[in-house]
Image (cartoon, grey):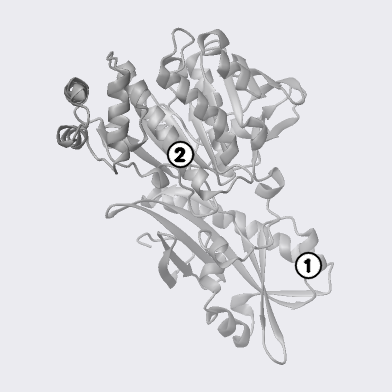
Amino acid sequence: MDFKLREGPWNKLFQGNYQGFEVEIHSNPESVLIVTVLERKKEKIEGAVIELFKVFAVEGELEDFVDTFPREAMVLIKHEPKSSLKYFLVSSTPSYAKYKEEEFCNETEKLLKKLKESARTIKDVSRAYDLSLTELHEAGEKFRAAFFSQPLMAPLITPTAREETGYEPIDLSERKRIGKGEVILGVTRGNVVVKEPLELLCRTTIFGSTTLDRKHAIHIIAEGGLISNVAVVLFDWDESFNGLNTPSNDLASLQKYKVNFEPIGFPIRDFKAMDLKVDLNLISVSGTMELFGVRGEEEAKFITSLIKEGKVDSIEELAKRARKSQLLDESKAGVKNRTIRILRLIDLRHPKLFGGKNEINEISKNWAKAIGRAGIIHLEGIERRAATLLIHNLLKGIFLHYDAMRKTKGVNALILLPEIKIILSAENPSLMEKEIMELLKKFKEVGVCFALSSDRPGDLLREVITLSETEIFILSRADVGVRMSRSKQYRIMMRPGLSQCTEK
């Protein structure tokens, strides 16, 4: 940790790596542990998930006390032949901060303040039980030595490693009571908080009002996924969501909407269109040819057969395969020559667009097993044909990625497609657009949800409306109608964001 935090000195207890993330654990003289999971891009640290713990030594029975404790906590028990040592760890819950001294220190101090409040709550509540809780630095040497010599201490308190160890902490935090897998949408006119399971928003369409207001709805759904530790993939046309990693500075508005979270920024990773490729191994050959205005059923079959020969990383490599191919029927020589010309035409139109495999695992990746991460696909400045090819290719890659994982329980990922009219227009849909539609239909089979927005339902393919299970219709940013096909419809005042978004 490169920054000077208050209430130190902070001594390093552990430094290591779990599931590809760098982890550091520090402690101070007052029994506080700070766990940081670092987000590094190349050699530079961009941000960190921070979680603080207050450690208590315990004497007495914990079970009844734990059942009524109103905060996130963990119980650790170290059994020895003649006795057991018990520890009670209260958590601040994880939060994300950019790795800049002022922001990192401010976020840590905010978490430390919450942790102190939780510690006071512990002391107050424990008085009603036959239980002795002593802050670890005030406990006997036996308790201190046993805790800090515990080799599993690091993975047990590291967000990214708890799942790896199979350890499930007792979790009674406000965040859990709000509910993993739930989205806080806003409040009713009667000031009742409205939250919905993420699974009920698994096929959501957003219409009405302005582009700005529709993007705000996308923003709120994104935050619901991220709080629920769901990987979010967000296609951004104009850098509208760059502020997702910065906490909102409008705490008063959040309190007005009865949001019991502090403002928070979320981990993001940016993927520029220029750095992504249309993976030739996943393309729709007929759909691609149609987008480029070329026809030829035989040529499409020939290109498909060339791709099936093995992994291909460029149009040039595909053309070489075509030139080297031996045709049993010489009458097909015209097909071969036309295919080579088609490939050359496509490469000339978009010389850097086609290539090999994208890092789908990085694009759609959870962060630290405690808070979700958003992979933002930047499409600003890209023309419609290239955007259609890229979106189709990435969606197909994401589907195959989760299909291979065979984890269909719950929500694995959330795909957000704001202002999708440019791709799924109701007028003369292309083969590629129809294939995108088929992918949207299949996503739920592999635990992938989506939300998309446009001006009006009539702007999009009819199949989009048929597929939709939840419709959000925005009269204005603060006046929103929600209709769920399975259950209900109602009006709400949509809440402000926990994070900032430019929402252009």
Mark with earlier residue (1, 2): 1
Return the residue nearer the eye: 287 or 57: 287
Q: Circle 2 sits in a helix, a strand or a loop, which is it?
A: helix
Residue at image position (18%, 20%) is 334
Residue 3 against residue 501 in the figure, above or below = below
Residue 98's x, y, as percent?
Answer: 40, 47
Give the x, y percent position of residue 14: 44, 72
- Residue shown at the point (49%, 64%) measured from the top left: 7
Whether 371 is drawn above or below 448: the answer is below
Query: Amino acid type of disc 1?
Result: Ser
The crowding category of the residue bearing disc 2, from other C-alpha atoms within 10 Å (few below 14, some 14 to 19, many at least 20), is: many
Residue 204: x percent and y percent? 60, 25
The answer to whether 145 is drawn above or below residue 94 in the figure is: below
Q: Nearer the viewer, residue 305 or 332?
A: 332
Question: Tag on residue 140?
Answer: none
Amino acid at dot 2? Ile
Q: Are marks 1 and 2 in contact (CB under 8 Å)?
A: no
Instruction: Answer above or below: position of 209 versus 229.
Output: above
Q: In which quadrant of the rendered view does residue 302 lie?
A: top left
Residue topped by disc 1:
126
Whether residue 380 appears in this view of the structure is: no
Image x and y of residue 5, in percent = 43, 60
Say which residue label 2 marks.
Answer: 398
In the drawing, does residue 138 fall left or right of residue 460? Answer: right
Q: Quadrant of the N terminus?
A: bottom left
Residue 47 shown left or right of residue 371 in the figure:
left
